[in-house]
Image (cartoon, rainbow, N blue to C red):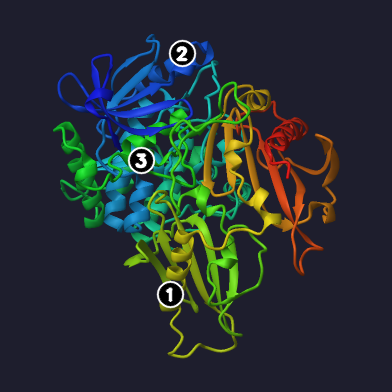
Amino acid sequence: MKVLGEGDREYAGRYRLLAMLGEGGMGRVYLAMAPDGRPAALKRIHPAFSHDQGFRERFRREVETSRQVSGAFTAAVMDADTEAEQQWLASVYVAGPSLQDAIDTAGPLPPEAVRHLAAGLVSALADIHRAGLVHRDLKPSNVLLASDGPRVIDFGIARAVEGSSELTSTGSVVGSAGFTSPEQAEGRSLTTASDIFSLGTLLVMAATGKSPYAGNTTPQTLYNVVHGEPDLSKVPPELMSIIGPCLARDPAQRPTPDQLRGLIGTLPPTNNPWPERVRQEIRGHEDDVDAVLAGSDLRKSRGGLVVALAALIMVAALGVTGLVGVTTPQAGTATTVAAEEPDPIPTTEAPTGPLAPASLRKLDPCKLVTSLKSRGSTDYDSCRFEVNENVTVTLEIGSRVLSSSSRSEGKTAGLATLVRGPEDGRCTVAGVLPQTPTNSIGVTVGWYGDGTPGKDYTPCKTGKKHLGEAVKAARKGDGTWDEQYRALAEVDTCLLVSRQRAQDVFGQTPSVESDHLRECTYSGGGEGVVSVGISGDPAESSSDDTKKVEVGGRDVYQRPSSTGSPSCQIEWAQAPVSGEDSDYYAQVVEVSYRGRYDDESTTAELACERARKLSEAVLEGLPTS
């Protein structure tokens, strides 16, 4: 949260803006004070969209939809002005983390807490469905945990159960793969039963830490949703009677909210149903907001911690993005495509310093652990080292932080440290990056020898040792890329496509999001992904469905797919690599385009046409040497 100085504070209607909670491609979300002194989460649209009538109509529709829903377990609309030059929407501020962040911080919820979660979400869905709506995007980041129960937020893509008007929501993909229903994944018409299926997947995640349909890729996850069976092996038995019926493949066989209330049963009274670690997070949010409302500067109190993950979730409807998963807005997370400039310009100042994304992209991970012998650079973001013939160390830069199965173990070289293991001869140790706290520098130590390792094998201790070595080298800027890798390895893929070229591809200005150092997602109607990496030369591919085409005077390799929503992937070798793998590996650019899940007009052929246009725009933005 970035507290606004007295000179920077202004008003939206009668709401005084106190702090900026987050920023996205379409606008900003503020902590605001209502006329009656209550805190509010206020979303205000960027001036650039003031004269975009299509966008203004979409925002009016979101406000209208949000106002239809009220209840104890939703974040109600307090006020809005859809006719203002900068449209805005104020909602009740919910002090608490999202369910996703709570799981990441404290691990899966105990069964009794999951039952309380289920009861609150069922009540919320009953209110939403009573208003004649289907939420369509019930997922862990759209559920906030307040001290008295959960809240469902973000009605930006909700739709009437019956209705002929369908407006495309800017910068959003309808539904989230691991928490969508089979009928939604296939683009079929939806009923309220779709939200019940999503509820079932969300409760599995709350109880186990992951979606029951999780795959290694989004297409694989969607395939699992449509064709696979849910993984319920770790769901506590006492929750199966609630979760199982929700995941019926036939929508008609899923329970209604009223039937689910009967399955949940009577719960013991409580004024806070969450585990102590989650309660601490909630208290932290409450304290920070109280401090801002009282006029305190958080930079002098709690070190500028993010206080409003709850409100930050609202930014998803604005196309909010996190550069390598940044959660602190002042770190410069959100980017959008720039107006009338050759290259896009981030909407907030990008983070700087030796551990910022731009600095980390300059480093060859194989040069950061000099005490070990590496196997050479066959990946931009990771490197494998040999300790001896039985033990290897893998270093990853900018990877997502460890899942909820990890535990906190102090600091390593000044970075908060998470540890997972030892288990099956492996241990992963991750140092959380201070400016991008959902990402880390991670070290995994693994045993690959025959038999069982002896007592002198201490993988977690070894991991911490080499993590410290890598972090110290990174802070010094040691180990930069050799010249032949530098041009592509240092590219920020979110800054490759100009605003005009993006509009040509998507028909609108897309939002821009990056979870990784060298991958960027452009979302606007459809979804385009641009990434760079070291992999097999596409020219050597033997796949029957790969076709060589020409884009921008260069041979590229195109592969369409009709699995799920139609998509198309294009790859080409931008530069060679050195060493013994140079005959096979290359520095490769990959561009893909996927239509919206509810867009029946996008065929595989059209997806490939848009992927080629996006590839041409990327080629224009890539360095020439």
Q: Say few, some or many: other residues with alpha carbon within 10 Å of mark 3 (under 14 / 14 to 19 / 20 or more).
A: many
Residue 96, quarter of the rendered image: top left
Do we see residue 428 in this rendering? Answer: no
Residue type, label 3: Val
Residue 235's x, y, as percent? Answer: 41, 60
Residue 138, quarter of the rendered image: top left
Residue 191's x, y, as percent? Answer: 49, 30
- How far apart are the alpha carbons under marks 2 and 3? 30 Å
Q: Name which of mark 3 and mark 1 comes first in the sequence.
A: 3
Instruction: Give the secondary structure at mark 3.
Output: strand
Say how many tags the image has: 3
Q: Nearer the viewer, residue 128 or 399?
A: 399
The residue beneath circle 3 is: 143
Residue shown at 74%/33% (left/top)? Answer: 616
The residue beneath circle 1 is: 465
Residue 428 sits above or below residue 36 on the image: below
Q: Say few, some or many: other residues with alpha carbon within 10 Å of mark 2 (under 14 / 14 to 19 / 20 or more).
A: some
Residue type, label 1: Lys
Q: Say few, some or many: other residues with alpha carbon within 10 Å of mark 1 (under 14 / 14 to 19 / 20 or more).
A: some
Residue 305's x, y, as percent? Answer: 28, 46
Residue shown at 20%/22% (left/top)? Answer: 34
Instruction: Give the secondary structure at mark 2.
Output: loop
